[in-house]
Amino acid sequence: MAEKNALLTLPTGETITLPIYQGSTGPDVIDVSGLLKAGYFTYDPGFMSTAATESKITYIDGDQGILLHRGYSIEDLAEKSDYLETCYLLWYGQLPSKSEKEIFVQAITRHTMLHESLAHFFDGFHHNAHPMAMMCGAVGALSAFYHDVMDMRSEREREIAAHRLIAKLPTLAAMCFKHSIGQPFMYPRNDLSYSANFLYMMFGTPCEEYVVSPAVERAMDRIFLLHADHEQNASTSTVRLAGSTGANPFACVSAGIAALWGPAHGGANEAVLIMLEEIGSIENIPEFIEKAKDPNDPFKLMGFGHRVYKNFDPRAKVMKKSCDEVLAELNVTDPRLRIAMELERIALSDAYFIERRLFPNVDFYSGIILSAIRIPTSMFTVIFAVSRTVGWISHWQEMVSSPYKIGRPRQLYTGETERPYPD
Ligand code: ACO
């Protein structure tokens, strides 16, 4: 029951009572679903002020720069937890006990292999296909293997689907990379950690032993963890919308991957590196800053700005620290890093960026780390997709495990009204 109400007076003079609900934190929400009876829709392009659902998974306060998963801050998780433990937290709602964690890690590790037929799908892709294009197709294809056996009403089957997705996405991601460079696929290794196994499948070959550096393994795990979930973003909302039709969860995650691909969302980390290469040297930075500020130029500084964070992106802070550590540990002196740091300095002191509250986001630094650990630029968004899979599937599970409606927005129609077809 709502404790407060909002009153809306319509042009007819009629007053409508709209219940106001209070979450555990964050802005109150006005329930506008009753407006339809009065013959009105609400209008909010880009969902700037629309809460599309109730959720208990992730909380963001964009003004304060706060990101909580199930109540735990991203800073604490990045320092004290690891990716698979964070996956457990997102899916089950609580941190695992020691034995729960062991069982979970074991379950994920045992699901990393793919049906052998899936490998043949890759023969149909041209070698220079973008890895994200292959990911959309290959993850969607998983639904062909796990469709009839999946009863979404069963909690246990939903859990198995989640385990399969978290476990198999790194294997598929590495296959996309191997296909693009013409090397044989590497089978997963169950004796390695989640991150080390991914790096092994990416960089190992059957010809010689590949030893994963602990520093790189830690950096990879941190990247996975920092991207694990982010509330009702574009790709998560896409997964929820697709899932609201009762679609297979593997197909829903494939829809999420498609939404993530765009440069305004997950494609930004790839776009940051492309932009740094385009800038080329520190002397060229002012020219690019001017382009970014020019309202007639579509160019934007990639890795800057966020729909929700208008103060700073807490993930970016952790990622910057991680970035410094990785570059020092690996002794990498990447010229693009100097450009990135100078770009950050100038943008943070420029009135245009300050007034619009445009700060570096997580993608600004993650691209540099990924590049330092020799992940090719075209794989950046794929890695984001691997990380975010747990967020997508946790939101899907939250939706389908309680009563829900098909997602079906309405519109403000401004086209032609009915007219006669010419004789
Ligand atoms: N460079 C230059 N100007 C910018 C930038 C940028 N990166 N981002 C926003 N602006 C300007 C806009 O032009 C606009 O200016 P105006 O008020 O003079 O018209 C103002 O700042 C507000 O920007 P909006 O586009 O209205 O903000 P919105 O919340 O819709 O967009 C977005 C957020 C999409 C992230 C945007 O900032 C952007 O495109 N950034 C670059 C891409 C990027 O880094 N995306 C990653 C997001 S994080 C993630 O998905 C993990």
Image: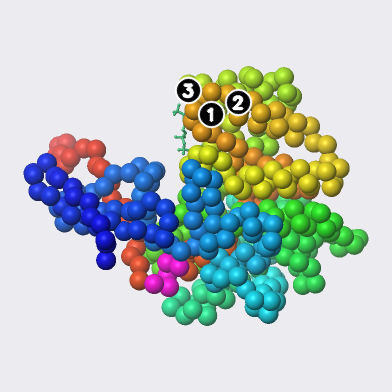
Q: Which residue is mark 3?
A: 295
Q: Is residue 8 visible?
A: yes
Residue at 63% across, 44% down:
316
Kind of residue at badge 3:
Pro
Looking at the picture, the colour scheme in use is rainbow
Q: Is residue 380 visible?
A: no
- Horizontal side of 246 relative to 136 (left or right) equals left
User: Range of the magenta residues?
Assistant: 398-402
- Horizontal side of 265 relative to 372 (left or right) equals left
Badge 1 marks a residue whose secondary structure is: helix
Is mark 1 in CB contact (under 8 Å) with mark 2?
A: yes
Q: What is the tally of numbered marks visible in this picture?
A: 3
> Residue 161 appears at what percent x and percent y?
56, 72
Badge 3 marks a residue whose secondary structure is: loop
Q: Earlier in the sequence, mark 1 or mark 2?
A: 2
Residue depth check, mark 3 versus mark 2: number of the one nearer the observer? 2
Kind of residue at badge 1:
Ile
- Horizontal side of 333 relative to 112 (left or right) equals right
> Residue 278 appears at what percent x and percent y?
68, 28
Dominant secondary-structure state across the stretch colored magenta: helix
- Horizontal side of 56 relative to 331 (left or right) equals left
